[in-house]
Amino acid sequence: MPYEIKEQKVLVTGGAGFIGSNLIDSLLLNDNTVVCLDNFSTGNIGNLEDAKKNSNFTLLEGDIRDRETCMKAVAGCEYVFHQAALGSVPRSIADPITSTEVNILGFVNLLFAAKEAGVKRFVYAASSSTYGDHQALPKVEHVIGNSLSPYAITKYVDELFAKNFSDIYGIETVGLRYFNVFGRRQDPDGAYAAVIPRFVSNLIQHQSPYINGDGSNSRDFTYIDNVIQANLLAAAVPSIVFKERLKEYQSSTAGVPEVIKEAAISEVFNVAFGARTSLNELAVAIKKGLTPYDKAISQVEFQYGPNRAGDVAHSMASIHKGKMVLGYNPQYSFKAGLNEACAWYWEKMK
C-alpha cells in the first residue's frame, strides 16, 4: 500500500473480536505499539494468542461504556481503530437498550477521549445497515433510507456524532460501512452468529443449515483481508491527499455535496467487494468449498423459513469513493475469500 501506519502507538477497541484481532495482527507486523481494549462480552481471548507473544502489544480489559476506561485506553495513542460494538440486527431487536448503550454511549465516550488525547485520526466501524429501506443498487454513501432496526439506528447515530465532533473540535474521523464481513476467526457459535460461519459449522457437522426466506436475498460478502486493507488506508492517507482526492471524487460524481476546503475530515466509505451473492448461491458455494474435505457434505440439504424482521432483501455496495479517496483495492473476491475461509474453518473444527 502506498501509505502505511508504522511505528505508531494505536488503540484497537474490540480487539479480541473477529475483525479487531485480525487488524491487530496487521498493525503489529508494521512495528506499531498496539493497545487492545475489550470487555470480552463477544470477543475471544484465543483470538489474541499471537498478539500476546509480541512485546509491542498491551491488553486492557474494560468497557467502552466507562469514560475513565476510554481515557486510559487512548492515552498517548496517535490513531484509534474503533471496532467495539454489539452487532446483530436480531439482538438489537431483542434488546435495544444494551445495543444503544454500547453502540452510542460507548462510541461517544471513546470519541471524546480521542479528542481529548489529540489523536491524529479516529477510524470506526460503521455499517451497511445504515442504508435501511433504500432499495437502489449499488449503495452509494450519500444516499440512505429509513433504518429498519435499533442496530441500524445506533450505527447511523455514530456517523452523526463523528461528523459533529469533526465540525466542532476538528478531530479527523473516518467511518467504514462494512458489508457482510467474513473470514478467519468469525465465531460460528451463538444465537447471533453470522450466516457464513453458521452455514459452515452446520455442514461440517452434517446438520441442515437454515436459510431465512426463499434464498433469493443477496449480500455483498466481503472477505476479512479487504476490510483490514480499508482500515489501514483510512488511517494512513495523509490529510492533504485525502482532501484533494475527496474533491476529485465529489466533482466527478453527481449529487455529492461540494466539499468545504477548510473543513476537518469526516467521511464514510463503503467497504465491500462490489458484487452480490444470493443465499442460495452462497449455500452452493460453501458446499463446494467444503466437499473436498468431506464428500458427505455434498448431500446435506438446506432448510428454509420466514425472513427475519429488520433484514433487507438485497445489498451491494459501490466502492468507487473508497477507490478514489483511500486507494482501496480489494484483493479477494467472494469466491477466493470463501475458499480461504472454508480451509480455515475445516482446520479449526475437524
Image (tube, rainbow, N blue to C red):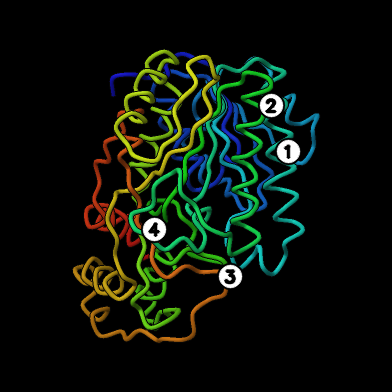
Label whose residue precedes the other's in the sequence (1 or 2): 1
User: Which label belongs to residue 348?
Assistant: 4
Q: Of circles 3 and 4, which is in front?
A: 3
Which three-letter amino acid code belongs to the residue tagged 3? Ala
| In contact (CB < 8 Å): disc 1 and disc 2 | yes
Q: Position of residue 253 (x, y in %)?
A: 32, 37
Given residues 264 and 329, the one toward you in this image is 264
Point 69% across, 44% down: residue = 39
Residues at circles 1 and 3 in contact by the CB criterion of under 8 Å: no
Q: Quick one: SS at disc 3? A: loop
Of callouts 3 and 4, which one flags the residue occurring earlier in the amino acid sequence?
3
Look at mark 1 in the image and give the residue it sits on. Answer: 62
Q: Give me the C-alpha separation between circle 4 and circle 1.
A: 28 Å
Q: CA distance from mark 3 to mark 2?
A: 30 Å
Q: Position of residue 46 (x, y in %)?
A: 53, 47
* Residue designated by label 3: 191
Q: Label 1 vs label 3: CA separation? A: 24 Å
Query: Could you tell me if the residues under marks 2 and 4 are in contact, i.e. CB atoms within 8 Å?
Result: no
Tell me the residue at 68%/22% (across/down).
168
The image shows residue 283 at horizontal and vertical percentages of 30, 74
Quarter of the image holding residue 264? top right
Asked whether, in this view, residue 140 is left or right of residue 48, the answer is left
Task: Check the picture and name the quadrant holding the C terminus.
Answer: bottom left
**Which mark lies nearer to you, 4 or 1?**
1
Which residue type carries mark 2? Ala
Circle 4: residue type: Lys
10 Å neighbourhood of mark 2: few (<14), some, or many (≥20)? Answer: many
